[in-house]
Image: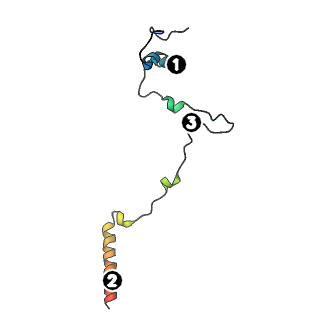
Amino acid sequence: MFRTDKNDGEEWPGVSLHLLGPELLARGLEHFTIDGRSLIDVVRLPAFEPDQPYAWPPPRTFDSALFAPMPHDRRYSAEWGVVREEQTRAVRLRRERGSR
């Protein structure tokens, strides 16, 4: 049997301490780093049915509404002052026409 470190076979109070050596050996690493690939990124669970996508991770759906152009309302733009003047002018014209 291959021994991963000098403490093989000893009882450890924590699983993380006990599995540290074998996991590093299995991954071919000397130590863990923040830059290392996560198992979450590489593990795939098959659907166990022919011609079916993986059961995990779930397929990502693309919602095109997230990228649809929004309607442009000049009141909420840098032109808000011009729009306000146009609205004021239109109200003034309606009042003048109504008073005649």
Residue 26 has which mark?
1
Q: Using the numbered discs, state the Cα–Cα distance from disc 3 to disc 2 in whole angstroms.
A: 65 Å
Please give the name of the residue rendered at 34% of the width and 79% of the height, measured from the top-left corner.
90
Q: Quadrant of residue 13?
A: top left
Q: Earlier in the sequence, mark 2 or mark 1?
A: 1
The total of numbered circles placed on residues is 3
What's the amino acid at mark 2?
Answer: Leu
Q: Which residue is mark 2?
A: 93
Q: Residues within 10 Å of mark 3 (few under 14, many from 20)?
A: few
Q: Earlier in the sequence, mark 3 or mark 2?
A: 3
Q: Earlier in the sequence, mark 3 or mark 1?
A: 1
Residue 56 has which mark?
3
Mark 3 or mark 2, whichever is nearer to me: 3
Please give the name of the residue rendered at 48% of the width and 54% of the height, measured from the top-left corner.
67
**Marks 3 & 1, CB-CB < 8 Å contact:** no
What's the amino acid at mark 1?
Answer: Ala
In-front residue for pair 65/81: 65
The percent coordinates of residue 17 (x first, y second) are 42, 17
